[in-house]
Image (cartoon, coloured by chain):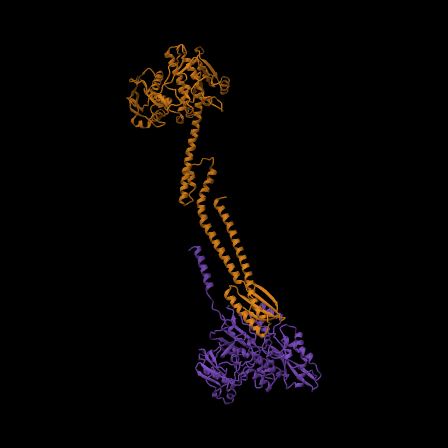
Chain colours: A orange, B purple
Amino acid sequence: MKLATRLQSQMNFVFVVTAALGFLVLSLNTYFSVTQIKDKAINLITSHLKEIATAGITAQSMADIDREAARLTEAWRATQDIDMRSDIYVDGQLIAHSGQLQKFGLLSSFANEKFALPSNQNLEIHIELDLAGVIFSSILLSTTFFIFLSGCYLLIRSKLFKTIREITSPIENRATWLSNSYGQSPGPDEYHAQFESSNIEEVKNLDASLLSFISQIKILEESAAKQSFDLGRLKMAEHLAHNIKGPLASLQMRISVLDISEEQKFRLIEGVNNVLMSSQALLTARKVRAVETAHDVDIHLILSRTITDFKERLPERVQLAFLHNDVSQIPIKGISTEIESMFRNILDNAGESISAKGKIEVSVQLTKNQAAISIKDTGCGIPKDRLPLLMKEGATFGKPNGTGLGLSHALSTIQTLGGKIEIDSEIGSGTTVKLEFPVTAKASELPSIEIDKTQTVVILDDDPLIHQCWQLKIPEDSGVKRVNLYSAQEFELWMAQHGPGDFGSRVYFMDYDLKTDHTNGIDLIARYDLALEARLITGMADSDPVISEARRNRIRLISKSNLANMQISILNRSDDAQISGHRGSNEGSTYANRN
Amino acid sequence: MDARFFRALLCGAILSFGCTKKEKEPLELKIHHPKVDIKLDPHAMEDAYSMMINSQLYRGLFRYNPTGDVLVDLVDTWTESADRTSYKFKLKPATFSNGDRITAKNVQLSFARLFLVGAAIGADIDYIKGAKTFAKTKNLNDLGIKVISDDEVEFMLSFPSVLFIKHMAVSDCAIFNLKSLSNPKELPDGFSGPYKLESSENNRLKLTKWRKDPFDSINPPEKIIFFGSSENPVELAMKDETDTLDNDPVSSKDQAALEAKSWGAVPTVLTSETYIVLNPKYVDLAARKYLASKVSSEDLIREVAHPIFKPAYGFIPKGFPGEMEKSDVNPVEKTSYSGKSISFKLDYDPDVELEVKIIKYLTRVWTHDKISITLNPMSKAEKLRRLFGKISESVVARKGMDYPDGISVLTYFRANYDANYFHISDPAVDKKIDEAMREFDTQKRISLYKETQNLALRHHTTIPLMFGTDASGLWSQKVKRIPSHPMGYHTMLFETIEMRAD
């Protein structure tokens, strides 16, 4: 039921009840008043006349009775609103009369009192009260009350309900409309066209607010749909990245022990890194950036790696020069995959802009706080009027298969780094892309892990490939006792069987995600108080919740992607023989308590 | 203009219509009376109906209210001498209906005329000094009523009378617009009462109210029509041709029918007495003694079987000082009639149920070989005419009181009283009445009243039958309020009646 209709229905009920109660109270009041007045009248007349009549009715006392009755009646009329008449009989004979001659009619009340006098005469007093005035007054009062009540009711109904309807009708219509439109995705314009029935400013404002609200909902619905899609992609990418990291780490480990030249090993490992980066490229969707965490990277190394890769794809007619300018390292805080993607896009653009022979020159300049990278080509160039548009998503020039995402992505990436991008181009002369960004302190070094031969290495990971990787890192002939555990249950059982051991007698490498709901690597480290002896080796080293939890428990954190590059030193008190891993990278190692 | 405007207009029209008081003709009060000879001269009137009309046209120094109390009328203030033989009256500033001022001279001449024309009341108030002498000399100087100033007059009495003020209040003592006594039979223009005679034709007297009166009701009758009719009064009432049956007997059935027409009853003529008058010319004393001895008031009351009626042994109504108990009456000798054969007519009104019952009773108890009674039914008017003309051989009659004192009944037995239709002329009675009038001691006066009644009763010309009346006291719906008038409506002042406004 609509609010106004419900209120009106209740108002009708209240009106009827009030009117009925009013009539009832007035009727009862009239009835009891009349009864009381009648008793009063009888007492007045009889008490006076009986006294006169008691001595016996004579001609003289008849006159006295008549005079007294007339006097009492006149006094009654002067003081009461109800007219009265009386007839006094002695032995059936009318001896006195007061009041009006005729009976009052239907609207009257009678009372008869009979007395046997000591003189053996019978005195009979008939009293009649005219109730017409009282009843008329009561009716008048009732009518006035009813008219007043009706007036109030009609006034409220016409004014208040009009206002209520003016307030509620648009809201109810909107509710109805929204209910009817559920699932039909109505547009704001359609909504706005329906409701203009209120002149009340607040309702208009509410209307505008609701319109704005619905518009926002529409935008959020679209956004949520996209985000949902992107989150799906992200989940899938995370899953893939997580699952691929183990095998790739194992592959890197195996490459490192291949009997090939160091240059070839480097190239292979870089290839594996490219696969890793490709898997990370899945995360380059715009929403993924929001959930990816920036960390210390060497942008010079990323640029070098990208150029090396680019050279292999560059045709021979195009020469590439990389001018280091004595710069060996450019530390910044960023996402390596994004940065590499930015460089690859710019280099690809440069390469594609050169249709014949040409040259690409990449130069790096480093000042105290600022780094500048210039990528200059001798390609076809870009028209001046198109340059402002190039940074916009979807804008492209000169590339038959261009998506228009390259430079806009470069812009967003450089802005994330706090830097800027400039494009200078001339048709026929070529294009120069200048990137400038602030540098941070030197990236942290990958800490080396030292293991004494007397120590036992306990490895907990559900991935067998990781165990193979550790086998390469700590071979059996290294003299280090290695315990491989594949689940939390196995770890708990092993710990139950062997106890915590002496402090420093063990080194624990624990995975975070053990594919079980009831615990994870951090929980186990905390439960067995292993923070000083354990390291968390996880593919979720970039995850803020994991970082926060590890930091809270003061647990050192190592990304699985850096496992291949991690340097492990096996010490022997009598023999300082050292087994070293491959050349490490500055990237990929983090501490839980890093800044 | 919208609907609201028209609604407002309609409401206004209804309200203005409701608030506009329509001028209406004042209601006429129609009073019937038997076709008697109405005498519009208070000094010459004999019947109650003439008295009723004259009471509205003329007023005196004092007046009776409906319950018999004396109130000042034309008098403003008065003083009396210590020996109660001199009363000085100061008059109110008042006028006659023709605008002439009412003066002390008018008062003197009006009372002088009373004695000159032999008004009935004259016998009552001949204690006014020089009244009898003046009746012979017609010299105002002989009359003990002196004009002191225009508005002050002095009455001197031969002896103090307790009844003087009461006598001054009877309607006979009216004040006329007399300038001289050159033609005392003619009454001059101008009425001293609140009503004046507007027209008099075809036995219809139309009175209109010409002044406001201190005793006026809220809405007194503005026009009163008195008309004589021989038609049955109840039928007149049923046809709305009369507005009262106050003095008429009405059967229970008729009364119910009239009450259904919103007629109402008030107490009336409670002092009335019904009696038989035997004319000595036709019924000798022996026969009257015999007939009186056969009548038992108690038996008659039982036969009538109505609580209104009470046994009557004398002439002063029950409840008044001087009323006669059975023991007060000198016993009538048990006698049989052995005189000459007589025959007489008994007048009665066959329309009156009570009189029919009385006749039935009397014919039964009066059965005698030598007494032949001829029933003589007639109209009330004819019966009254014959009664007042003293030509009835015998008649069933009824009489009320002129004023609330036993003497008002007894004075009718005076020998020289014109209205004495009781066929009594007894100096002993006159003497007792005079003594009673002089007596201020209540107990002694009551004894004198009783002695007077016994003296009158010994003539057996009047046989008391019963007290009480069958007069209905009914008035029509035109009358809203009317004072009780226990002495009958002929003593009532009509300006005290309240008419309905609509």
Residue under the point 40% across and 43% down = A204
Residue A297 percent across, percent down from the top left: 36, 21
- A372 with respect to B218 (left or right): left
Residue A384 percent across, percent down from the top left: 29, 26
The answer to whether residue A136 is above or below residue A501 is below
The answer to whether residue B499 is above or below residue A311 is below
Decide which of B365, A506 is in the foreground and name it. Answer: A506
Decide which of A427, B64 is in the foreground and name it. Answer: B64
The answer to whether residue B455 is above or below residue B67 is below
The answer to whether residue B294 is above or below residue A288 is below
Q: Residue B282, can we see it?
A: yes
Tell how many labels: 0
Residue B215 percent across, percent down from the top left: 49, 73
Q: Residue B186, can we see it?
A: no
Residue A566 percent across, percent down from the top left: 40, 16
Location of the C terminus of chain A (image quadrant): top left
Residue furthest to the bottom in view is B137
- B361 with respect to A556 (left or right): right
Decide which of B160, B313 is in the foreground and name it. Answer: B160
Image quadrant assignment for residue B428: bottom right
